[in-house]
Amino acid sequence: MVIVYVILSISWLFVWFYFVRKEIGLTFLGLAKNILPYALTMGVTIAVSWYFTRNITNMYLMLVAKIATAVPVYIGILWMFNCGILKEAFHYVLQKRHKD
C-alpha cells in the first residue's frame, strides 16, 4: 500500500510539473533545485530517527520516540542551512500566537 502511494505521489509530481511548466515556464532543473534539498533533509531525518528507535519494540513508544527524534533533527537541519521556509513558519506561528 505504501509503495502504491509513493508511486502515485511521484507520478502526480510529473502531472503537476506539466501544468506548471505551461503556466510559468518552470524547468525540470528548477523543480529539482526546489525539491531535492527538502527530500534529502527528510531522508537524513528518517535515517536518524530509525537509528535511534530501531530497538524499541512497543509500537506506541516507537511512534512517540520517532516523532521526538524527527522533529528536532528536521528543524535543526533547516536551521543549520538558514532555510527561509522555516523562518516564515516561525514568523507565522508567532504572529498567530500574538493575535490570539
Image: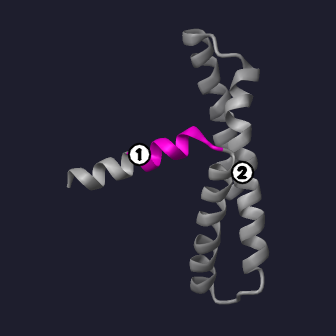
**Boundaries of the magenta span:** 82-91
Q: Amino acid at mark 2?
A: Thr
Q: What is the x, y in percent for residue 63? A: 59, 77
Q: Amino acid at mark 1?
A: His
- Label 2 SS: helix
Q: CA distance from mark 1 to mark 2?
A: 21 Å
Seen in the image, is 52 located left or right of residue 20? right
The answer to whether residue 14 is above or below residue 78 is above
Q: How is the image coloured?
A: one colour
CB of mark 1 within 8 Å of CB of mark 2? no
Dot 2, how many residues are within 10 Å of its Cα: few (below 14), some (14-19), or many (20+)? some
- For the residue pair 25 and 69, the one nearer the viewer reads as 69
Q: Nearer the viewer, mark 1 or mark 2?
A: 1
The answer to whether residue 4 is above or below residue 23 is below
The answer to whether residue 23 is above or below residue 57 is above
- For the residue pair 21 and 98, the one nearer the viewer reads as 98
- Would you name the residue on which mark 1 appears? 91
Question: Is residue 7 visible in this depiction of the protein?
Answer: no
- Would you name the residue on which mark 2 appears? 41
Q: Work out which quarter of the rendered image holds the N terminus and state it.
A: bottom right
At horizontal 77% and vertical 80% (from top left) the residue drawn is 54
- For the residue pair 39 and 23, the one nearer the viewer reads as 39
